[in-house]
């Protein structure tokens, strides 16, 4: 990935001459309160292997399923969540009965972690910062040799072979989890490839996740929105949602476009929660590479109105190769 605006030696010189980005300042000054939300951009930053975008994977599955012609491509405005549901509908009439989730996870099996995975997970371990990832693959946990741990009791209640419990996470050996908000662990927000049917791809999947989370936030005596101090006793306190609502958030590596239905809904609920209990100091940042990406007015409008500050860097390398991850 090359920068469009600051190329070659010009950019490297700027970096090496002590230029401090806003991202580096956030990592230095707010590490005690952060949770990282990491998308597929970290996998695309690994130049040693050809990891792919979600769109490219779904496009290939659509060809494999005979849903589109072998040479056909999806237009840039295609809704990936709707495509996932349409593919599942199409494959249901197939005698092979191949699940879209299964096909998707198959394409992630050979993915490898890179140096950025190691640097970022090591930084998070040192500072006891939780990582919430929208990815399904195991590159982040592989990078720090973390192992999957299931809580003894979980409110999800579904069989692990189908829907992983929401309080399951990847931990490093010997590290104790106090509360999700102040302990290092890797949490998979949209499911993990280890449990194929946990993977949230389509709109129907996201609606199920919203229903699941909404019960904990808005129903019953132990709901999150019951009171300001309910966050220490609510039903979701042992899940990654604890970090999502209790911590400052640093989001990078994902587009946060309209397809991110579940995460965008959660950001709306977080903004509502902060407003209700007057948590003006609760912060959130969204990092994007303005030299490598097209702007998204819809995303910008959304972020501005849910209290998420946009942080521009010149290119993706300024995120994933930042020396701040070594602090």
Image (spheres, rainbow, N blue to C red):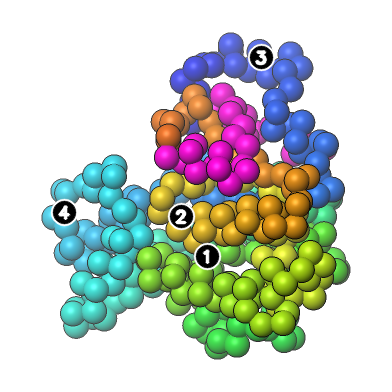
Coordinates of residue 27 in the picture (x, y in percent):
76, 38
Tell me how far mark 1 sits from mark 4, CA to CA. 29 Å
The CA span between labels 2 and 4 is 27 Å
Q: Which residue is mark 3?
A: 14
Mark pair 3, 1: CA separation: 37 Å
Q: Is residue 318 magenta?
A: yes
Q: Percent position (x, y) of residue 276?
A: 70, 57
Q: Which mark is residue 260?
A: 2
Q: Residue 175 lies in what quarter of the image?
A: bottom right
Q: In the rendered structure, which disc, 1 or 4, sits on the residue that comes first in sequence?
A: 4
Inter-mark Cα distance, 1 to 2: 10 Å
Q: Secondary structure at mark 4?
A: loop
Q: Are marks 4 and 3 in contact (CB under 8 Å)?
A: no
Boundaries of the magenta span: 298-327
Q: Which residue is mark 4?
A: 70
Mark 1 secondary-structure assignment: loop
Question: Mark 1 highlights which residue?
Answer: 190
């Amino acid at each position: 990935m090359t920068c469009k605006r600051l190329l070659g030696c010009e950019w490297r010189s700027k970096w090496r001459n002590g230029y401090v980005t806003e991202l580096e300042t956030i990592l230095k000054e707010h590490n005690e309160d952060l949770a990282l939300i990491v998308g597929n951009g970290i996998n695309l930053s690994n130049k040693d292997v050809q990891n792919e975008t979600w769109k490219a994977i779904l496009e290939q599955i659509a060809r494999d399923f005979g849903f589109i012609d072998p040479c056909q491509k999806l237009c840039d405005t295609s809704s990936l969540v709707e495509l996932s549901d349409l593919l599942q509908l199409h494959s249901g009439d197939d005698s092979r009965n191949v699940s879209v989730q299964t096909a998707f996870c198959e394409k992630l099996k050979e993915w490898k972690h890179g140096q950025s995975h190691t640097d970022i997970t090591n930084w998070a371990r040192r500072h006891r910062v939780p990582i919430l990832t929208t990815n399904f693959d195991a590159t982040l946990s592989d990078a720090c040799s973390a192992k999957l741990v299931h809580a003894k009791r979980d409110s999800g209640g579904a069989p692990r072979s189908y829907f992983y419990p929401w309080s399951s996470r990847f931990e490093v050996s010997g590290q104790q989890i106090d509360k999700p908000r102040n302990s290092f662990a890797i949490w998979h927000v949209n499911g993990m490839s280890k449990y194929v049917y946990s993977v949230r791809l389509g709109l129907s999947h996201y609606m199920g996740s919203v229903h699941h989370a909404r019960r904990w936030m808005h129903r019953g005596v132990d709901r999150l929105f019951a009171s300001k101090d309910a966050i220490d006793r609510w039903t979701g306190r042992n899940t990654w949602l604890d970090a999502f609502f209790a911590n400052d958030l640093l989001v990078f590596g994902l587009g946060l476009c309209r397809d991110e239905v579940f995460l965008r809904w959660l950001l709306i609920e977080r903004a509502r929660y902060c407003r209700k209990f007057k948590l003006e100091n609760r912060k959130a940042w969204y990092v994007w590479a303005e030299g490598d990406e097209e702007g998204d007015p819809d995303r910008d409008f959304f972020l501005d109105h849910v209290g998420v500050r946009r942080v521009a860097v010149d290119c993706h390398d300024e995120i994933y190769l930042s020396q701040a991850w070594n602090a």
